[in-house]
DNA sequence: GACTATGGACAGTAGAGCTATCCGTACCGG
DNA sequence: CCGGTACGGATAGCTCTACTGTCCATAGTC
């Protein structure tokens, strides 16, 4: 198919498709003549992924390109590719330019919890810095209430990750698997956040007795 | 204190403070003369919250303003204020302009799970649309793997919310409580996402036997 | 052969989030 | 009370992101 059809079928404007091609998010089409090209279902698929990562996952164009590059690299271990999606989540706090008191305390706290659960994680995992940064921010803001929930979050996310990884193991095709994992990881953040809000509304209703303004349905 | 000290103590430039004042994120200082004002620890606190919500929580300036307005409104029920923070998370997918097949299927799926767990949530909760949007996106992208994890996410988030709400119940001061809840909710998303990444690395290591490139320490 | 579509290059745009400048007044040390 | 710095308020400007529009020469299409 040509670019017009790709645009119609994906709902993405031709101008934007050209932009994604320029920025390296979308591979070039197959040349049919020195200045003509044709695209296939792979391009359509990729385009839909791009929009999902940007619109739903909230990634920037650059972050999306990097994630997709990791997906495309067949030499990258599966969860290394996933790791590339790590640094791409919602705003990572400032890097440890000069670790202040809060940062140090936060790092110690995380390390203790991780050791306690026996997790094997690398310090290079951007998620590590991200977690420490959030913890440090919360400590700076006052009481360590969020910090006290860290154990809870780790316990529940361990179960979540266990099942997510298990679901991946029983697969064949590497390319499709990686795609699914990356999308699941990035979109999963948004889904989990939304589900958390729903759960909070339900629980607050039960525990605080506050009535919802409009029942669903 | 005057604006210079506020700037020094918060690490936010005077220009940015003026900007936040203009945009209504930060209340005006107390007038000491027709064109002079003084700020207190409340302003400093608020300023730190603003930076946390923007830098760590990833909220936009406008979203931050709205969340803070809800925090300041003493008539708003506690978890109604929290609900205001809902629409502010990472990128909500397109509103249901014209509910296509995927959207309808996603909505049905969510409704079934919610009914199954007996959650009481309102359709006005922006998190509802957000969840449906993510689910629909995943369905459009291909297999419904993420969708199959929905039950897992709901089960685990129910436990998380249960404990978060319980932690809030045992409090007194409304203003501080709301602040803590909002910060905990928004920053919690980032923390949970980071912890999920760490857990995924650990579990993938155990289940897939992929060695981390650099062990922590 | 007229007409539309295309690839490629590049300039332009809109919005977000600041940042800089200016002005007239206020505070502060000497 | 005088010079210098700080302040508040208003407005203009800047940087970055994510497109969008225009142009041109060539390709495909009826």
Image (cartoon, coloured by chain):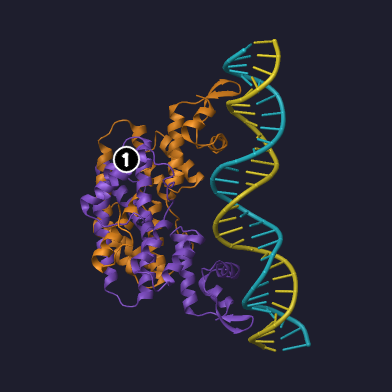
Chain colours: A purple, B orange, C cyan, D yellow
Question: Chain under label 1?
Answer: A
Q: Nearer the viewer, residue B124 or B5?
A: B5
Whole-percent x and y of residue A150? 28, 47
- In the image, is residue B88 above or below residue B106? above
Residue name at image x 25 percent, y 35 percent: B170
Quadrant placement of the C terminus of chain A = bottom left
Whole-percent x and y of residue B125? 38, 51
Q: Quadrant of residue A175?
A: bottom left
Tell whether A214 sits left or right of A62: left
- In the image, is residue A215 above or below residue A167? above
Whole-percent x and y of residue B54? 46, 45
Q: Nearer the viewer, residue B109 or B1?
A: B1
Residue name at image x 35 percent, y 67 percent: A181
Classify mark 1: helix, strand or loop. helix
Image label count: 1
According to the picture, the residue beneath numbered tag 1 turns out to be A105
Tell whether B112 sits left or right of B35: left
Dot 1 surroundings within 10 Å: few (below 14), some, or many (20 or more)? some
Quadrant placement of the N terminus of chain A = bottom right
Residue name at image x 46 percent, y 47 percent: B59
Q: Quadrant of residue C4?
A: bottom right
- In the image, is residue A186 above or below residue B13? below
Q: Nearer the viewer, residue A199 or A99?
A: A99
Q: Is residue A120 visible?
A: yes
Whole-percent x and y of residue B207? 24, 67
Q: Is residue B103 visible?
A: no
Q: Nearer the viewer, residue B41 or B160?
A: B41
């Amino acid at each position: 198919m040509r670019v017009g059809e790709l645009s119609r079928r994906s709902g993405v404007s031709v101008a934007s498709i050209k932009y994604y091609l320029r920025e390296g998010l979308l591979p070039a089409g197959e040349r049919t003549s020195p200045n003509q090209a044709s695209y296939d279902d792979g391009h359509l698929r990729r385009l839909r992924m791009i929009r999902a990562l940007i619109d739903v996952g909230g990634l920037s164009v650059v972050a999306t390109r990097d994630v997709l590059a990791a997906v495309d690299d067949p030499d990258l271990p599966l969860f290394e590719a996933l790791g590339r999606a790590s640094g791409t989540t919602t705003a990572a706090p400032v890097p440890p330019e000069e670790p202040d008191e809060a940062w140090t305390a936060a790092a110690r706290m995380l390390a203790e919890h991780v050791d306690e659960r026996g997790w094997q994680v690398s310090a290079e995992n951007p998620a590590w810095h991200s977690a420490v940064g959030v913890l440090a921010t919360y400590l700076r803001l006052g009481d360590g209430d969020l910090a006290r929930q860290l154990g809870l979050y780790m316990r529940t996310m361990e179960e979540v990750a266990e099942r997510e990884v298990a679901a991946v193991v029983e697969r064949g095709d590497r390319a499709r698997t990686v795609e699914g994992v990356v999308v699941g990881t990035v979109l999963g953040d948004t889904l989990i956040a939304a589900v958390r809000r729903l759960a909070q509304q339900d629980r607050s209703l039960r525990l605080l007795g506050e009535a919802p303004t409009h029942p669903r349905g």
